[in-house]
Amino acid sequence: MSPNDLYRSLLMTSGGMTKILKNLEAENSIKRMDHHSDKRSKMVRLTQEGKAMVEKGDGYRHGW
């Protein structure tokens, strides 16, 4: 997913999303990669650590 898609779907500003993505990348929760056909763009992917964080948060939300 692109950062643009993320901030639009979450109704955030691009600056706010950039700060969040930098923090998540520093925690090794996401990885930013070049877009395969547009080298000016980046794509964001969850790492294994990021997936574990999401699962843990989902369990908390559902009371698991």
Image (spheres, grey):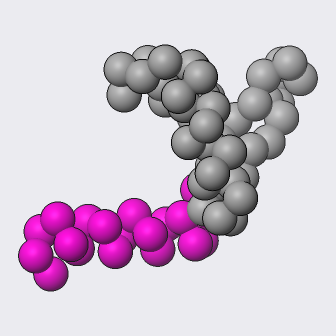
Determine whether 23 is above or below 13 in the image. Answer: below
Q: Position of residue 42 (x, y in %)?
A: 75, 30
Determine whether 64 is above or below 35 in the image. Answer: below
Kindly indicate the quadrant of the structure image that contains residue 61. Answer: bottom left
Note whether residue 9 is visible.
no
Question: Can residue 52 be found in the magenta stretch?
Answer: yes
Determine whether 40 is above or below 33 in the image. Answer: above
Give me the residue at 83% from left, 35% from top: 34
Q: Is residue 33 left or right of residue 53?
A: right
Kindly indicate the quadrant of the structure image that contains residue 12. Answer: top left
Q: Position of residue 54 (x, y in %)?
A: 39, 64
Give me the residue at 49% from left, 18% from top: 13
Q: Position of residue 45 (x, y in %)?
A: 63, 49
Q: Is residue 57 left or right of residue 2?
A: left
For the N terminus, the image quarter is top right
Q: Position of residue 58 (x, y in %)?
A: 26, 65
Residue with the most extreme bottom position: 64
- Main SS of the magenta part reads helix
Q: How many marks?
A: 0
> Range of the magenta residues?
46-64
Q: Is residue 57 left or right of residue 39?
A: left
Give me the residue at 71% from left, 59% from top: 26
Question: Can residue 49 be found in the magenta stretch?
Answer: yes
Give me the residue at 69% from left, 35% from top: 43
Q: Is residue 2 left or right of residue 11?
A: right
Note whether residue 40 is visible.
yes
For the C terminus, the image quarter is bottom left
Residue with the most extreme left position: 63
